[in-house]
Image (cartoon, grey):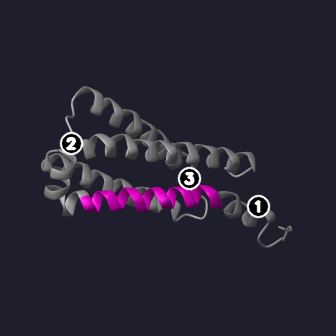
Amino acid sequence: MTTYSPTTGAAATAAPEAARPLRMFLTLDAVVTGGNGLIYLALSGPVGDLLGLNSGFLVGIGAFLLAYGVFVGALAARPVPPVTGTKLVIDANALWAVASIAALLLWLEPSAVGAFWIPAQALVVGAFAALQHVSLKKMREAGVR
């Protein structure tokens, strides 16, 4: 239980606790996204062959994912992730999930493994967006801004 202290204040103690679920989902997102980015960069040829995707395409995606994972990780490392940055991550994750399915339906011609992988990763990224959204909402309802 948090008690008020004239030197620290109850809000200073309650805010990081209220942000814990959001930080956890941001951290998981950063690890999964950064890990995928590293794999796509380091193994673009074999992964491209497995997924039926151009290795150059995977290098570009990998670089983006690695940078994005670092950004998400930086937000997760804060005791209370900033609302604006968190909303950006939620929106980007939702957009990624939708764009992945659209790309699969409209222009990508992956292998059978790729046809499984693309919607599977879209589902994971969409789940991160939903979990982060709910966690941010609960954090704000707890009075953390």
- In front of the other: label 1 or label 2? 2
Mark 3 → mark 2, Cα distance in angstroms: 40 Å
Q: Where is 141 relative to 106, above or below?
A: below
Q: Position of residue 119 (x, y in %)?
A: 37, 40
- Does the stretch in magenta take in 70? no
Q: Where is 106 relative to 29, above or below?
A: above
Three-letter amino acid code at disc 3?
Pro
Query: Residue pushed farthest top?
Result: 106
Q: Earlier in the sequence, mark 1 or mark 2?
A: 1
Q: Position of residue 68 (x, y in %)?
A: 36, 53
- Does the stretch in magenta take in 23? yes
Q: Which mark is residue 11?
A: 1
Q: Which mark is residue 82?
A: 3
Part of the protein shown in magenta: 20-39
Residue 92 appears left or right of 39: right
Q: In terms of secondary structure, where does tag 3 sit?
A: loop
Q: Which mark is residue 111?
A: 2
Q: Quadrant of the N terminus?
A: bottom right
Q: Where is 13 relative to 128, above or below?
A: below
Q: Earlier in the sequence, mark 3 or mark 2?
A: 3
Q: Are marks 3 and 2 in contact (CB under 8 Å)?
A: no
Residue shown at the point (55%, 42%) measured from the top left? 130
Q: Position of residue 7 (x, y in %)?
A: 79, 73
Query: Residue pushed farthest front?
Result: 112
